[in-house]
């Protein structure tokens, strides 16, 4: 198990993170959404 | 100058060069991916703001690449001049990735030139984006190859040492040493993370300084989201690095954790002070060191008392390790809350203090990079090539290293100040608002060559 974590898993996480970045990057609906109004 | 003095000055000069270079190298590795993502989003969503983000980041990037080239060359030179015995021995085994790094850099530089000069030359922006692929690959693979050399210093293999001579040399076995995967992946992902948070800091700063432009809001949201993904990745890979250390360099992990006795159920100590072998005032997280080392809360972790005294690294690396991990965790929280807050429409993430926190995140992640490298390098002491060659054996005996140190320190000062001044001028002279207005005018008048640019 540790062998897997030390050898393959680091690259899987790295490449996975790059893919995820490309997938979520265009989801920018919230970017310009204003915050909630203050409660009166 | 005695040999001790030349070893001392060689150390200081190498530390200075690496500490300075690493800032530019990290930006150089991470920013091309950020540019690529921004341009890709711009094309996909048909949004000029993201295209402009990519354009402006690319312009700034060139300046940091230029400084990275100068300091990178200095390192190459210093490796041979300051550590000749190390290069003579290790060079026989590990020259391959050193050369490959140079090729990766050429690959990047050539395509970067073409990319920069062809912004308005393509009818189809997607083709222009393709030119960035070799730039981003070249940048990341430069880091991969040079980190492989560093990994080899920590876990040398791929040769036999017979009477001080290297025989049976296998360069590929040397490259794929056990330290390689965790080191390479941790270095590359933290470069992405740091670049994302530096760019986020700039966007947050513009918003603090009165801009309410949607361009900066999009930039901040994008970079914080990327920062979140890469910082979580960095922490996960950091955990794998802990497992690597526990197996192959246990003294480095034990020194970072002030772990003296070999025992199970080992706790993680954060900060505190050392009194003999007793740790005082530390924040203790039970079982966490056993989990970091072996993914098992009861696992035994090797302590420092198992090692001869002259092979134990300096114990101050504890604070370096803690600094790196604290900043990593802080940035996961800051970017995670920002992302969640944007979706939940929380007010506090728009407050001035939160934006200042994001601005601080830029320099803080650079500090984490420095702390990480210092930890990894000082933690390998007294070895330059673990278990084979100690640092003093590797150094030059030249009597002029101190003069070199002063000259290089002056060079780095000039480069550091110069690059900041140039970057500030570049962006001040050409503010986003004006550039957006200019581009909109261009589009309206239909003056852009070649029709539709997307
Ligand atoms: C959050 C949890 C983190 C953990 C558990 C962690 C763990 C580690 C470990 C164990 C090492 C030593 C590896 C070795 O010597 O082989 C290391 C090195 C390093 N860390 Fe971290 N790290 C974390 C976060 C970060 C962050 C946030 C940064 C920078 C933004 C960073 C940058 C570095 C660098 C540049 C090195 C030197 C290269 C290397 O040896 O891998 N780390 N880290």
Image (tube, rainbow, N blue to C red):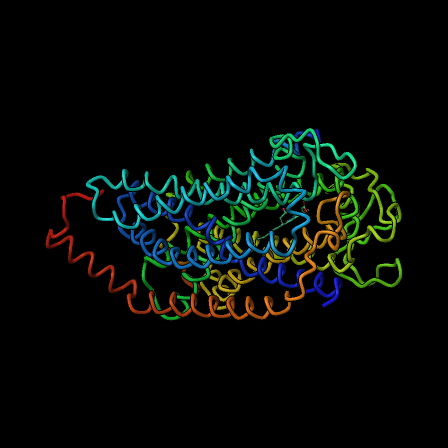
Q: In the image, B8: left or right of B273?
A: left
> Percent position (x, y) of residue B267?
80, 48
* Quadrant where the image shows the C terminus of chain B: top left
Against B400, residue A26 (above or below) is above
Which of B18/B132 is in front?
B18
Against B74, residue B144 (above or below) is above
> Percent position (x, y) of residue A31?
38, 52
- Splitting the image into 4 quarters, where does residue B14 fall? bottom right
Q: In the image, B138: left or right of B17?
A: left
Mark count: 0
- Splitting the image into 4 quarters, where does residue B371 fall? bottom right
> Percent position (x, y) of residue B36?
37, 44
Residue that appears at 56% across and 37% down: B96
Q: In the image, B299: left or right of B140?
A: right
> Percent position (x, y) of residue B1?
71, 68
Q: In the image, B16: left or right of B41?
A: right
């Amino acid at each position: 198990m540790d062998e897997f974590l030390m050898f393959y898993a680091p690259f899987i996480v790295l490449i996975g993170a790059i893919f995820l970045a490309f997938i979520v990057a265009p989801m920018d609906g919230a970017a310009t959404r204003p915050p909630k109004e203050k409660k009166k | 100058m005695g040999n001790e003095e030349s070893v001392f000055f060689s150390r200081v000069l190498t530390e200075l060069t690496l500490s300075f270079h690493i800032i530019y190298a990290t930006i150089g590795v991470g920013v091309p991916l950020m540019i690529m993502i921004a341009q890709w989003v711009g094309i996909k969503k048909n949004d000029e703001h993201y295209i402009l983000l990519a354009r402006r980041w690319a312009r700034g990037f060139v300046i940091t690449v230029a400084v990275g080239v100068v300091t990178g060359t200095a390192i190459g030179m210093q490796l041979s001049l300051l550590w000749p015995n190390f290069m003579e021995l290790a060079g026989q085994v590990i020259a391959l990735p050193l050369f490959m790094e140079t090729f990766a850099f050429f690959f990047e530089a050539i395509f970067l030139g073409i990319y920069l000069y062809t912004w308005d030359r393509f009818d189809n922006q997607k083709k222009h984006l393709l030119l960035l692929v070799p730039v981003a690959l070249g940048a990341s693979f430069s880091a991969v190859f040079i980190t492989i050399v560093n990994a080899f210093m920590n876990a040398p293999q791929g040769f036999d040492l017979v009477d001080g001579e290297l025989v049976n040399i296998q360069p590929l076995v040397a490259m794929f040493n056990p330290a390689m995967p965790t080191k390479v992946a941790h270095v590359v992902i933290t470069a992405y993370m740091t670049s994302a948070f530096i760019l986020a800091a700039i966007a947050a700063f513009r918003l603090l300084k009165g801009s309410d432009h949607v361009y900066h809001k999009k930039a901040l949201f994008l970079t914080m989201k990327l920062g979140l993904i890469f910082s979580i990745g960095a922490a996960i890979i950091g955990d794998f690095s802990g497992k690597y250390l526990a197996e192959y360099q246990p003294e480095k992990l034990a020194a970072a954790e002030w772990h003296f006795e070999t025992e199970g159920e080992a706790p993680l100590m954060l900060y505190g002070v050392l009194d003999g072998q007793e740790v005082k005032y530390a924040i203790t997280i039970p079982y966490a060191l056993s989990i970091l080392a072996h993914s098992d809360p009861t696992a035994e972790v090797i302590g420092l008392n198992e090692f001869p005294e002259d092979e134990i690294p300096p114990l101050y690396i504890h604070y370096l390790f803690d600094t790196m991990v604290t900043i990593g965790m802080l940035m996961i929280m800051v970017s995670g809350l920002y992302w969640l807050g944007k979706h939940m429409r929380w007010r506090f993430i728009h407050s001035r203090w939160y934006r200042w926190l994001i601005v601080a995140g830029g320099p803080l992640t650079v500090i984490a990079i420095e702390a990480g490298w210092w930890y990894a390098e000082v933690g390998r002491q007294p070895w330059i090539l673990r278990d084979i060659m100690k640092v003093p054996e590797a150094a030059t005996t030249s009597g002029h290293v101190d003069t070199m140190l002063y000259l290089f320190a002056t060079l780095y000062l000039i480069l550091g100040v110069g690059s900041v001044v140039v970057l500030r001028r570049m962006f001040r002279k050409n503010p986003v608002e004006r550039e957006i207005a200019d581009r909109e005018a261009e589009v309206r008048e239909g003056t852009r060559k070649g029709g539709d640019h997307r």
